[in-house]
Amino acid sequence: MSGSDTHPWHAEQWRRISAAHGAQRLPHALLLTGPAGLGKGDFARRLAGALLCVNRDDGGDSCGVCGACRLVLAGTHPDLHFIQPEGPGGMIKIDAIRTLTAKSVLAAQDGGHRVFVIDPADMMNGAAANALLKTLEEPAARSILVLVSSHLDRLPATIRSRCRTVRFPVPPAGLVR
């Protein structure tokens, strides 16, 4: 089941990102933003799977069966990294971002992308945000950063300005199940 089946309100955002990926014009950093509860984290995971898949379908989704997809589904793909707060209500600290930076410059398996999902990005403490800024200013080749935030105002403007923003508005009532 593709992400559009579970979140039909993502269709336009997926179409734009998939087209950019297909044209090899995907930016090094995306900022997925909108109100909480719209499935932005699901979109980030779907995108990560598609970026790592070696046999995407015509809609840009992962095939779900190749070796890379099996690793993603098992949570063991060496080129997929999730950066999250340390415990419920915790912050994302500088050490997590330093690890991201160190891994982002390594060669990707099979010459593909390295994908880093920071969710929720607005939970980075000040030191972590400053450390991420350096990575955003000097991105490593073939590394994609996907930041997820329901509180855009909590992210420094310097980070927001270095990401392509993908907005997720509240969907029309008819699309929500």
Image: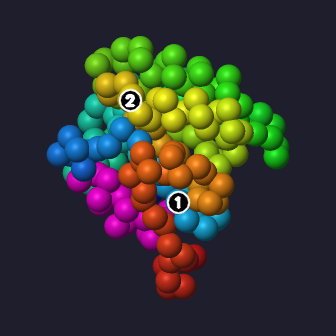
From the image, which quarter does the C terminus lie in? Answer: bottom right
Q: Is residue 75 visible?
A: no
The quadrant in which residue 173 appears is bottom right
Disc 2 target residue: 139
Q: Position of residue 128 (x, y in %)?
A: 65, 33
- The disc, 2 or 1, on the residue closer to the chain's N-terminal end is 1
Q: Residue at position x 32%, y 25% from top?
A: 141
In terms of depth relative to the viewer, which is nearer, 144 or 124?
A: 124
From the image, give the main secondary structure of the stretch colored magenta: helix
Q: Position of residue 140 (x, y in %)?
A: 37, 24
Q: Hey, what amino acid is under mark 1?
A: Thr
Q: Is residue 11 left or right of residue 45?
A: left
In terms of depth relative to the viewer, which is nearer, 19 or 58?
A: 19
Q: Position of residue 103 (x, y in %)?
A: 49, 18
Q: Is residue 92 left or right of residue 155?
A: right
Q: Residue at position x 67%, y 27% from top?
A: 94
Q: Is residue 15 visible?
A: yes
Q: Is residue 39 magenta?
A: no
Q: Position of residue 69 (x, y in %)?
A: 41, 33
Q: Hey, what amino acid is under mark 2?
A: Pro
The quadrant in which residue 35 appears is bottom right
What residue span does the magenta drawing correspond to? Answer: 6-19
- The CA distance from mark 2 to mark 1 is 21 Å
Disc 1 target residue: 33
Q: Residue at position x 17%, y 46% from top?
A: 23
SS of the residue at dot 2?
A: loop
